[in-house]
Amino acid sequence: MKSLAKNSIYNIIYQMLSLIFPLLSSMYVARIILEDGVGKVAYAQNIASYFTSIALLGFPAYGIREIARVKESKTECNQTFFELLFINAISTTAASVLYIVLLICIDSFRNELLLYLCAGAVVWLNYANIDWFYQGKEEYGYITARSLAIKVLSLVALVLLVKQKDDYVLYALISSCGTACNYILNLFHARKYITFDVNIKKLGLKKHLKPLFVLAIAAFLGNVYNKVDVTMLGMMVSDAVVGYYSNAHKIILIVVSCCIAVTTVFMPRLSYYYENDRCALNKLVDFGTKLLIAIVVPATVGLSLLASDAIVLLYGKAFAPAGETLAIFAPMLLIRPIGDLLCYQLLISAGKEQKRIYTSFIATVVNIVLNYLLIPKWQQNGAAVASVISEVIVNGLLLTEVLKIVPIKIDKIFMLKTLAATCAMAVGIIGIKQIVHAELSIVLLEVAVGVGLYVITSFILKNEVVLNLTAKIKSMILHH
């Protein structure tokens, strides 16, 4: 049995790598291929992602679960691996054929055929995608080491090869090559666990089809919901607008992921408490909600105030129009992390994950309608408004189901203390903006002053969550 503590550390490192390297890559290419090139590649990768979703079917979740169930038996593990690999080959073939047909049939894709072939390489590379196997085997050490090596090599390749504005196709190719290297290493490394003497006639495929199909529908709807903004922007406006939107969206996803990571570890305990101790469940949900509020409320206000400065600092003045887009996205920091705890982890712990299918469908329809209405008038800002509204709707619908499981209480005194500390932070940031004007200096100073004022005000008001957090951090430092 793998060490849970070690796997947790490896997984945290892996998640951080998944955030940091795309940010570094996007910062570099934004200054080389500019907003038009970024937009073209983002749109091509967006189109390819729909077919990747078809190829994946429902493997990321289902494959992990099934391998985890049989990992102690080498025979069963071998059998399950090849059953899933065979189904994966069928779904990937279907997705690859559909993608090629799309490229042939649509003029705008044929005109940029090389770009769409490079961006779409991830679709047919899915034949070799067995990440679910390593996660099911809890081989997080290998996953992390492999990911670090490939990301470093990809970043070096970008710096050495992408030198001018017309190199956007090369950028797309390098991105796909990173995926290819991951998959090739996976196959070579799999020989450590898998023997290739399986009898194809004895593969039991039928038992996997129904659960995979249900997961595939949920995954595809989720993918459409998350990707339709870029698709519609690419169809309705310019490549530059897609570039503004994509880079603002990258930043918000990075910050949201950091906030969500705070309570990701709650799920196993939520599942246990749901079955065995409802009182403890209520207390854990209450603690998690307070913890997130103490983090995401100031983060939301801070990002909305820092948005324009952060965009210019990270991507250059050419991307200045994305500053307003990022500020519009800021409420996502409030909605998604709390939604992840209450409307994702808690629902799955209670065995009600199927509720997410119809809400994802409703959110997708709402998002498409709002994009159609708002993009012509506000361009990338309209798409951002549509995303925020859709996120409110999907989490609002799921919250009605959550309230049937656990009562959600709001501590008014705690909320007032958090808001007061956030206001002090906001005043400090606005004051700094009036005094300092150098790009790097202002962002660093605003962050330092903002965080400092928030913590100091929280201490003065005796905000319980902030006091507990600082005490735990202090204890960890002293012990080390």
Image (cartoon, helix red, strand yellow):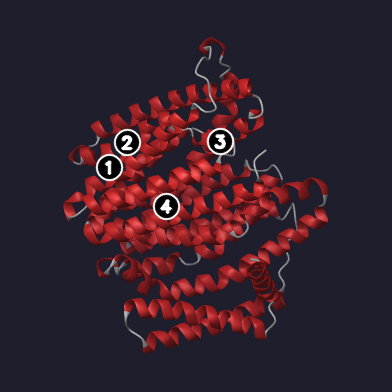
Rendered image: mark on residue 147: none
Q: Residue at x 48, y 62 (%)?
A: 255
Q: Identify the mark nearer the N-term, 2 or 1.
A: 2
Assess whether mark 1 and mark 2 are in contact (beta carbons under 8 angstroms): yes
Give the spatial CA distance, label 3 vs label 4.
Answer: 25 Å
User: Residue 256, how many percent across, how many down?
Assistant: 51, 60
Q: Which of marks 4 and 2 is nearer the N terminus?
A: 2
Residue 215: numbered disc:
3
Name the disc covering residue 369, or none. 4
Q: Eyeballing the image, is 267 above or below 424?
A: above
Q: Mark 2 points at which residue?
A: 121
- Check whether the beta carbons of the residues at disc 3 and disc 2 lie within 8 A of each other: no
At horizontal 44% and vertical 27% (from top left) the residue drawn is 91
Residue 422 in the image: above or below residue 221: below
How many other residues sit within 10 Å of disc 3, few (<14), some (14-19) or many (≥20)?
A: many
First in residue order: circle 3 vs circle 4: 3
Q: Label 2: how many residues lie within 10 Å, few (<14), some (14-19) or many (20+)?
A: many
